[in-house]
Image: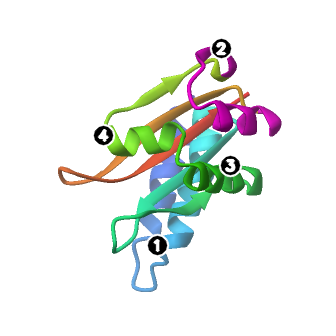
Amino acid sequence: MAESQLSDVFVEMADTLVDDFDVLEFLHVLTERCVHVLGISAAGLLLTDQQGALQVVAASSERTRLLELFQLQTDQGPCLDCFRTGQPVSVVDLPAAGRWPRFSAAAAEVGFAAVHALPMRLRSEVIGALNLFDT
């Protein structure tokens, strides 16, 4: 990846820190930039609400948003495991891994074969997870 490309993303993110800052728009842009900069197919972000329940707050595409919702509804998937353990989850071949059978089938249905989930932290507390999907 070109240094100028990464620099442009950092400048764009810093430009959002203004008085009329829209956190949801920022998080949506974050997922889109993850796709662009990392060369992946899609990204989704789940964060906890005031009651501590995970909610889908941003996704780079509608199919990704629906897959993230499916994780929450079925209570299985990499983002949930990542959130619960506070540790990254990486599966490069979902069908072969045998983990989360319902999630893996739903991911395959929309064309995803690999996933990486990263914990999102506020200081030492895990407040969500970022899913990175690829074909």
Please name the predominant secondary structure of the magenta segment in the image: helix
Which residue lies at the image location 59% right of the left edge and 49% below the top edge?
Answer: 74
- Report the residue marked by disc 1: 23
Few, some or many C-alpha atoms within 10 Å of disc 2 (few <14, some 14-19, many ≥20)? Answer: few
The span from disc 3 to disc 2 (Cα, nearest Å) is: 19 Å
The span from disc 3 to disc 1 (Cα, nearest Å) is: 22 Å
- Give the structural element (helix, strand or loop) at label 1: helix
The span from disc 4 to disc 1 (Cα, nearest Å) is: 23 Å
- As drawn, the label of residue 67 is 3
**Residue 36 visible in this rendered orientation of the protein:** yes
Q: Nearer the viewer, mark 2 or mark 4?
A: 2
**Residue 40 visible in this rendered orientation of the protein:** no
Q: Quadrant of the C terminus?
A: top right
- Report the residue marked by disc 2: 96
Question: Is 9 covered by the magenta stretch?
Answer: no
Amino acid carrying label 1: it is Val
Few, some or many C-alpha atoms within 10 Å of disc 3 (few <14, some 14-19, many ≥20)? Answer: many
